[in-house]
Image (spheres, grey):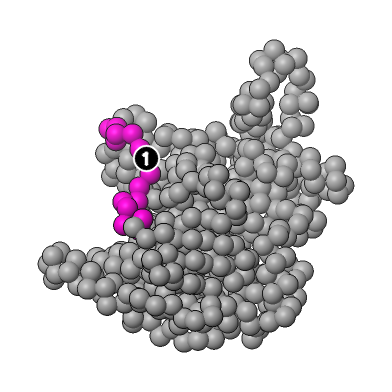
Amino acid sequence: MTAFRVRARTRAYGAAMRVPDVPDGGPLTRMADGTIKQVNPLTGTQVWTVPGRAHRPLRATATAPAPLDPAAAGRLCAFCERNYLRTPPEKSRLVRRAGRGDGGPGRGDGGRWEVLENLPAERLDDTVAEFRRVPNLFEILPYEYWRANYGYAPPAAAEAHRRAYLASPAGRAHVLAVVHDRLLAEGRTEAEWSAMTEGERLALSAAFFAGGHDLVVARRHVVDGATTDAELASAGTLTPGEHHHFTAYTAAAARSLYEAIPYARYVAVFQNWLRPAGASFDHLHKQLVAIDERGAQMEAELERLASNPDVFNDAALNYAITAHLVVAENTHAVAFAGFGHRYPTLEVYSKSAHNAPWEHDDDELRAVSDVVHACHAATGVLVPTNEEWHYRPVGVRAPMPWRIMLKWRISTVAGFEGGTKIYLNTIDPWALRDRVVARLLGLREQGRIAPMQIGRECPAVPGSLRYAAG
């Protein structure tokens, strides 16, 4: 099929799906002039979309692409694969071995994947990390927060890792160099550094081994074979198999933070893509933050669940189906254009009976990952995006589905929003659906996403979220 025919078909597909009216009595109201008023059914957030804003180009403001210097390959930022010593000591890494696929998360993705834990500094360059789990140098809740407020002491395994790492000259030099860089970034001077004893310096490294804020960093800064610094490697440029490993590895890391910090009530998992979305580096990574509260949104959802245990079907998926907002679906996951969000949002729900990411079996986790990956690929590399994971926290009995939100950070909250708490979202849910469906069809034709149903092909069965059946 020619490119022209593909474009013509996808335009017709989107036009055919366009719904002029909205269901009565729900969170979406279409005014006479075409303005869409939205209310998030779980949080109560109010959002308006005014006509005429939905077809603007979506891209971040960027400088002109610069040619890549071959000497700088793998060194474009602190997260790059030849800068292992610029981050705190890694907790683990995921490597890809040569050979046949092992039937696991990356099945069909070329090679056997293996997790290596607590590598000494001398062995960091022995393998190439496809993904690394490293401590965040600037934690949201620092190690001292847990120690001072809860009497937290490092787990025995973390303390053993610290002792072993510091026992080698290379490991000690690495830790001291990172502590030095952190202090200077915080505003300390070289004179203050010189006045410190080595013991005082090393004492500041406890968070590198027992903190509660980790990063999962991907290998690539730019795509393989890139010739300019603008060819960034986003979640959507990974293969479906690579993205599955990224997802599974992150889920396991979240579970381990609960185990390491018993005072954590929730581990927030999110991904900031590009600086307008909050990223320090334009290098693909997820963040995991252990916190001692569940947050206002989670508490609001728990209140809704107390009165209606099936609220995620009733108020979210079923309404999205009625409003014809479903964009993609496979056996264990479904995605739809969300409503009542400050930014255009794609919502991906697991249909599994399991409530936490790490409880999903391999097929279920792969299904969620495939749909999320496809949504990232449809979004494109140039759109600043937040990926947020929502799931049932440890210790909560009420069933909640694992769902992932992809939010396009294409507008800035300003004075109107601050004063009224009514947010202006420039793309209404149907316009978002049309954009994404058209893009997904093209990506599927190119073989860049995993097999799935798209748009009108989706079964879209009401009540198909089975989170309360476990």
**Number of numbered tags placed on the structure image:** 1
Residue 205 in percent (x, y) is at: 71, 35
Check residue 218 for magenta coloring.
no
Name above or below for residue 371 compared with residue 410.
below
Q: Residue at x 26, y 66 (%)?
A: 442
- What residue span does the magenta drawing correspond to? 53-67
Name above or below for residue 187 compared with residue 310.
above
Q: Is residue 332 visible?
A: no
Check the image and name the residue furthest to the top.
Answer: 191
Which one is in front, 87 or 49? 49
When asked about the image quadrant of residue 353, the answer is: bottom right
Check residue 65 for magenta coloring.
yes
Point out the image quarter for the N terminus. Answer: bottom left
* Side of 14 where 209 appears, left or right: right
Q: Residue at x 49, y 46 (%)?
A: 412
* Side of 291 where 384 appears, left or right: left
Residue 270 in percent (x, y) is at: 56, 55
Residue 300 in percent (x, y) is at: 70, 67
Residue at label 1? 61
Name above or below for residue 281 compared with residue 400.
above
Most common SS among magenta residues: loop
Q: Is residue 84 visible?
A: yes
* Side of 208 where 437 appears, left or right: left
